[in-house]
Amino acid sequence: MAPWGSRDGFVGESSVSLTRRGLRVASAVLVTASATLLAGSVLAATDTAIHPALWPKATWPLPMDAALEQRVSALMARMTVEDKVGQLVQADILSVTPDDVRKYRLGSVLAGGNSKPGGQLLANAEQWKALADAFHRAAMDTSGGHVAIPLLFGIDAVHGHNGAVGATLFPQNSALGATHDPELMREIGEATAEEVRATGLNWTFAPALAVPQDVRWGRSYEGYSQDPKLVAQYAGATVEGLQGKVGTPQFLDRSHVVASAKHFLADGGTKDGKDQGDAQISEEVLRTVHAAGYPPAIDAGVQSVMASFSSWNGQKMHGNKALLTDVLKGRMDFQGFVVGDWNAHGQVPGCTNEDCPVSINAGVDMLMAPDSWRGLYEHTLAEVKSGAIPMSRVDDAVARILRVKFRAGLFEEGLPSSNPLAARSADVVGSPAHRAIARRAVRESLVLLKNNGGLLPLDPRKHILVAGDGADNISRQSGGWTLTWQGAGLKNANFPGAQSIGAGIAEQVKAAGGTVEIAADGHHSGKPDVAVVVFGEDPYAEFQGDIPNLLYRPGDDHDLELIRHLRGEGVPVVAVFLSGRPLWMNREINAAEAFVAAWLPGSEGGGVADVLLRTREGKVAHDFHGKLSFAWPRSAVHGQGSPLFPLGYGLTYADHGTLPALPEASGITGEQVPVGNYLERGKPVHGYGFTLRGADGASTPGDVSPAATSDGALRMTALDYKAQEDARRFAWRKSDAQLVITARAPMDLDRETNGDVLLITTLRIDALPGKDAWIGMGCGKGCQGRVELGPQLASQAAGQWLRIGVPLKCFRKAGADMHHIEQPFAWGAGKGAEVAISRAALGTDADQVVDCAK
Ligand code: BGC
Ligand code: BGC
């Protein structure tokens, strides 16, 4: 039997309709089906009782250290309750200043995915160091009689020091899983730690020990594998790489950083793969699947663990004392500290971002309160004084944090910029040695799924076309958590020292005497001997990466067409697929002779050429090594049928089999609606209604243009933006009229509101005489959150297209109930206004962002 298994199966049996409304129905049906199969665990799923004695033990590797304890208690004896509460609060660098740190004695700051020194995307190492120094000086300032306690400065260095320009970008974790090489994890950890230290920071929010069970989850690529065994194998090695090995002089020395195993627990087990969702699983699955990485991380001395945004059977992890305290700190003997996630405490029932004694009492030692730190500090202080948070709990939390700071030598090491690595940051960040490790990781992570006729390896002395929109696109090959949170809005120029996959191929082909053309659209002057088509997912991270099924770019087949077109010309095609996760690829796999899963390889695109090409002498320098750490799906319906390519699958050049044609029905029918898109090319997307509402409140359908409200207050006409009639122009003849997009069923956008997610309107202002314009989200009768745009738009040059983004939190602030959004998009303006609109969608990549904090 073919290794890819039976070709029979579900395909064609299922006709689940995934229209916007159908989605709920469809997933309800699927859930019922699996509920019947898993009746046992469903019963358990309502149960939130935890039995710590059943959980695996771990051994904290650091013996009790009397001298350390002495230092901690001596310091704590000098601390006021204010000093102590300050240690429990972490603020984001975009919302806190060194003076704030000085005043509030905060214990930690972080740089969130979009937070850079001075708000500059391309801040250089000097700017990072200067900022770290400024915070350090503030924390160490004893002028007010304060005790000096150095800061932990954390960042998401999750695939290298990915927030810093010019850093080595290692393959994302789902790629690293395919290497099955724990030693490599150690080397990557070491290199990453050095680059972080070189810019003045001392803590990374890594490794992610998620065990993703449903790759519709947009953060699947942050996990090494769906297989708990592999995650467990990697956990200790990565922690030791980042922190140094316990018992050696390197442990937490000046070349290493504090690590943070995350997200505890079952971030990768949420229902339908929903980010920050609910893991509806038994205690046994929680323990045997999702907890697998924690005991080895603790055995390796991981100094912090980040609590998960997600829930277990309806209970938020940030309030789960049984798991955070009884299991993690008790049974597993974890003696570092627990850090919360980004305002995640605010999602615990009864809490807000500014107030959450429950989380601290449950065992979170430091709350991540990026923009909410001040209120949180005040409330926490009051609660400690009132006894709502027991002093013993505060002392335990503070002692845990201080121990880490002492162990990491922060009290002795002086200014961050005085670190020897920081002194030579230009040589350390993106160093050739680190890039060589990354390139090896790229080579080891590539998984060969098909190689019919032995098309690979390629002869570099030929004429090779590198096509597809990933051919020369470092952002696409790097994915999310790359310079920006979602990895959106980047150009190759933003990646000094990096190499695209196409550039890597070109380099080696030219050196061997061959010729190369690189063209995203596949255009070529001479007929290529072979084409390498590099294509794949757009970068994404939290929320934005969640998908309803395993279709790749539903409704947009341009990559497939490109492959087919080249084949039609008689050019053999190697498909190189860039993605954070396996997706349903049967058609693309069929269309190409060879298919390589390249994951998100990062900055060293040359590693792909190393494996795809022979040497100029005709030898194979590097064979394929990668084996799937996530099973490849047979259909686009999650969980249906056996995998097409099981875990551990991956061909080498020694394999000479032929993959027969795969069935081309995805298992999904119905129009596919990208989640979070409301208006596309001037029209409401499927599943949404579009109306014009007059000043008198009467509604007129907006689906067909031209249209006008019956009171004549608002007129709509079609307009060309990039294509024929792909925009609408709205003219207000009276004030108080609006255009409204309505969802068929209320939507819950609360979780998205927690991040930097924006509602982005692509628009052009033609006239705005009264400077009066607003955008809104409606939450039912009489419920609307409106954000004023007039002042910002009035300064826009008339006639210019612009993507203007409004943070979702602005709508919440303006009164919208984000749990219950009925109208995700409404727009109004004053008399005389003339505005063209082409698109409205959630996203992060806008030309201008409205600041509603002002
Ligand atoms: C993510 C964490 C991350 C933190 C800081 C959160 O939204 O869930 O993984 O460490 O933000 O950026
Ligand atoms: C931050 C990320 C964070 C996310 C939480 C973003 O604004 O940049 O670091 O993880 O919000 O949703």
Image (cartoon, rainbow, N blue to C red):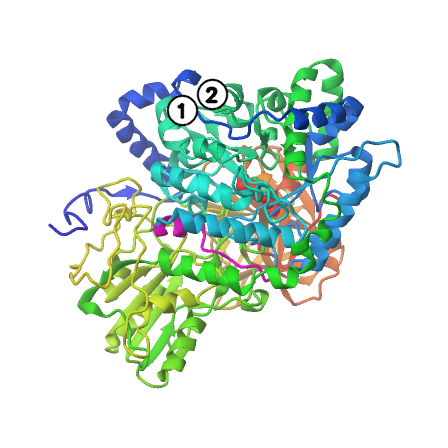
Residue for badge 1 = 56
Task: Give x and y (percent) for residue 734.
Answer: 69, 51
Q: Is residue 187 left or right of residue 730?
A: left
Q: Which residue is mark 2?
A: 331
Foreground residue among 542 and 258: 258
Task: Tell me: is circle 2 under 8 Å from ligand 1.
Answer: no
Q: Give the amino acid type for the residue marked by disc 1 in the picture.
A: Pro
Which region is colored magenta?
165-179
Q: Quadrant of residue 643?
A: top left
Quarter occupied by the C terminus: top right
Label 2 element class: helix
- Image position of 839 with respect to 202: above or below: below
User: Within 10 Å of the Cα at label 1, are there few (<14), some (14-19), or many (20+) other Cα atoms?
Assistant: some
Mark 1 or mark 2: whose residue is earlier in sequence: 1
Residue at left offset 34%, top offset 78%: 464
- Please state which amino acid type lies under the numbered disc 2: Arg
**Residue 42 spot, x, y in % from top left:** 33, 22
